[in-house]
Amino acid sequence: MLRQTDKPNSTDFRENQSRDNPGNTVRKQNGTTSFGGLVNNAAISTFGETGWLSMEKYEKFAEVNLLGSIRTTLAFLPLLRKYKGCIVFMSSIIAYFTLGNGIYSVTKAAIEKFCDALRLEMKKFGVLVCIIQPGNYAHSTKIQPPVSAEEIWNELSKEEKEVYNKEYVQEAANFFNNILNEGSTNGNEAVDAMVHALTSPAPKACYMVAELKEKLLVFVCALFPTAVMDSVLSYALSNVKLA
C-alpha cells in the first residue's frame, strides 16, 4: 500500500541504462527507501481487420502493450517483493471481445493472463496484483485517433484490395469512428480505480470501469456460448457489408 509520503516516479524503460538498474534509478530520482507500487499503463491502439495489418504492426503492438509491461514488471520484482508493493495493469474490456480492433484485443487478453499467473505467484510475498478494465474512454484518453479510410486503403496489400473495396473500408472506418466518438469523457473514473488499487489495504483483483451496456456485453461474452456472442457482434457489424 502506498503511503502519503511516497512519490510517483516516471522512467523511460526504452533506455538500456534504466532497464539495467531500475532500483538504483528510482532511489536516485526520488530518494526513497520504499517502493509502494508499479502501474503498467503504456498502450497504443489502432483499427483494422486481421489481413489489413502488417506483421511489423503486430510486433509493435506486442512490444508496447504486452512485452513492455512484462519487461517493466520483471525489472521491479525485487523491489516489489522486498517492500510488499502493488502492481497495477491497465487492461480493457476489449480483452473479452473485439469490434474492428483485434490487434489491441489480442494484447489486452494476453496481459490479463500474465496478471492471473503473477497474482497467484506473488501472494506468498504479500505483493498485490490488480487489473483495471476500462470501457470506451477513447474520447477522453485520445488513445485512438479517428481512422482515415483513405490511409487504410493505401496501406492494404494488393491481395487485400482484391478482396475488399473502398466502399467497404469507408463504411468500416465510419463505424469505428462512431464508436470512438461515443466514448466517455469522464476519464478520471479509470484514474480513481488505479488510485484505489494502490492505496487500499484490500484492493480488488479486477476493476471494471465501464458503462452498463459495456458490462452487459462482457457478461454475455463470459457466460453465454461463443455462438451467442458472435451473433451479438455480427449484428453490431451488420451495417458494414461487402458490395
Image (tube, helix red, strand yellow):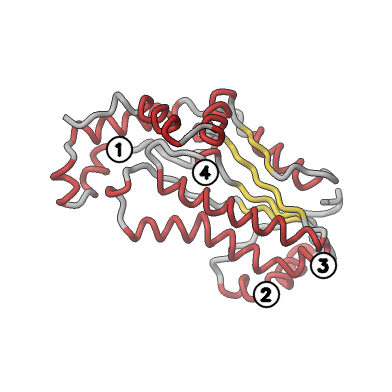
Please give left or right for residue 34 compared with residue 91 in the image: right
Sequence order check: which comes first, mark 4 or mark 3? 3
Residue 119 or 63: which is nearer the viewer? Answer: 119
Asked if marks 1 and 2 touch (Cβ < 8 Å), the reply is no
How much space separates mark 1 and mark 2, taking CA atoms? 42 Å
The type of residue carrying mark 3 is: Lys
Task: Please name the residue that numbered disc 2 is placed on.
Answer: 21
How much space separates mark 3 and mark 1, taking CA atoms? 48 Å
Q: Nearer the viewer, mark 4 or mark 3?
A: 4
Residue 8 makes an appearance in the image: no
Task: Please name the residue that numbered disc 3 is placed on.
Answer: 82
Task: Please name the residue that numbered disc 1 is placed on.
Answer: 148
Task: Please name the residue that numbered disc 4 is placed on.
Answer: 95
Residue 81 makes an appearance in the image: yes
Q: Nearer the viewer, mark 2 or mark 3?
A: 3
Q: Using a 10 Å C-alpha cutoff, classify the residue at mark 4 as few (fewer than 14 neighbours), some (14 to 19) or many (20 or more).
A: some
Q: Using a 10 Å C-alpha cutoff, classify the residue at mark 1 as few (fewer than 14 neighbours), some (14 to 19) or many (20 or more).
A: some
Residue 88 pos. (x, y %): 68, 51
